[in-house]
Amino acid sequence: MRTQVGIIGAGPAGLLLAHLLHRAGIDSVVLERQSRAHIETRIRAGLLEQGSVDTLTEAGLGERLHREGLKHDGLELRFAGRNQRIDLFGLTGKRVTIYGQQEAVKDMVAARLETGRPLHFEVSDVALHDIASKTPRITFTHEGQAQELRCDVIAGCDGSHGPARAAMPPEVMRLYERVYPFAWLGILAEAKPISHELIYARHEEGFALATMRSERLSRLYVQCAPDDDVANWPDSRIWEALHTRLGRVNEGPVLQKGITAMRSFVAEPMRHGRLFLAGDAAHIVPPTGAKGMNLAVADVRVLARALTAFFREGDERLMDSYSATCLSRVWKGQRFSWWMTAMLHRFSVADPFEHRVRMAELEYLCGSEAARRSLAEQYVGLPFDE
């Protein structure tokens, strides 16, 4: 097969890139190792910054998002018996929207299939070749047949464990990582959310978060040990922890349960030759700052613009600056996610100094409009570099 852009991965980054390229008249082939059912049902991120909503809307992907998404003008911090609302809209003029990643993926898959352009599920044995040349190739197996895809450009949108980043020469890569000494135990419950906005809680027993996926589905998290086992958390223990840390929650049948490790990761650069990394293939953030999917959308905006200039005009300047442009935003997102994570979690119950410092930080946040504005500006999303 032959195409202009070979895209590995049908998550939000890969599908959005394919859609933006299609609108620009650029051909692509999307390869995904999982089934369509799998990517459309796996629970991932659920909060979209204003800029991400605007991007999806401008791309013609916002119809269901605007109909079903839950718009939030603020969030709440709880600690030491105090409740502090952060007025996101009042401080920034922007809001965030709750819309599950799997729902955005459904919209993008439907849009891709409507174009009739290739989207191959359940591919295996994906390997990248000649990425430093002007004619890179992807080999893979699909429906039992070994195939080769010749491209002008390859976009690695295949997550942190995919083959794209692994194809980058180790001598040109620099990896940065921070592994946190805790994890999140998350549940999806058929229960009315306790608030129409997110609640972040710091408690002596650990962090907790109350969010939602709809007006009848609650998404709830509690801090746990990184090596913990879901089997150690029967529903009764989870509800007890949530009541203790959040004050009260509405209980209901637990539909899904899982433990998410917490880490920060960045791979530099995000481009080598004709291979470009986007989304989780290049960076991972702890979910506290709600930046994961939003950074992927930001990457794709930059990459789509760069590839459009290249294929339409033969101009490679935006491709050359792609990595630096994206990494500037990525590191700001990493800093904010690290800060939110550090402020709201118990790193060690044996360190009372750390606990008192974090409580003082939260008290300062409550008393300073400038501090609340800084949090709000970063939470709703920094402006795009156009």
Image (cartoon, rainbow, N blue to C red):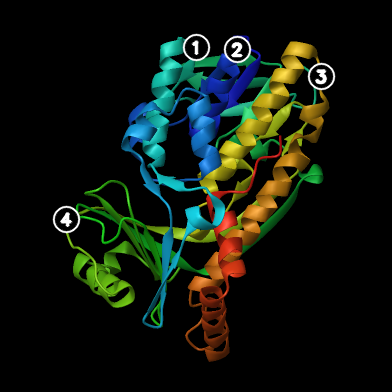
Q: Which residue is mark 3?
A: 315
Q: Position of residue 242 (x, y in %)?
A: 29, 70
Quadrant occupied by the C terminus: top right
Q: CA distance from mark 2 to mark 3?
A: 18 Å
Q: CA distance from mark 4 to mark 1?
A: 40 Å
- Residue 308 tag number: none
Q: Residue at x 41, y 65 (%)?
A: 76
Q: Which residue is mark 1?
A: 117
- Mark 4 or mark 1, earlier in chain: 1
- Mark 2 or mark 3, earlier in chain: 2
- Mark 1 or mark 3, earlier in chain: 1
The residue tagged with tag 2: helix, strand or loop?
A: loop
Quadrant occupied by the N terminus: top right
Q: Position of residue 206 (x, y in %)?
A: 41, 76
- Mark 2 or mark 4, earlier in chain: 2
Q: Nearer the viewer, residue 50 or 41?
A: 50
The amino acid type found where label 1 is placed reads: Arg
| Badge 4 vs badge 1, beta-carbon distance below 8 Å | no
Q: Position of residue 287 (x, y in %)?
A: 49, 56
Q: CA distance from mark 3 to mark 4?
A: 55 Å
Q: Which residue is mark 2?
A: 27
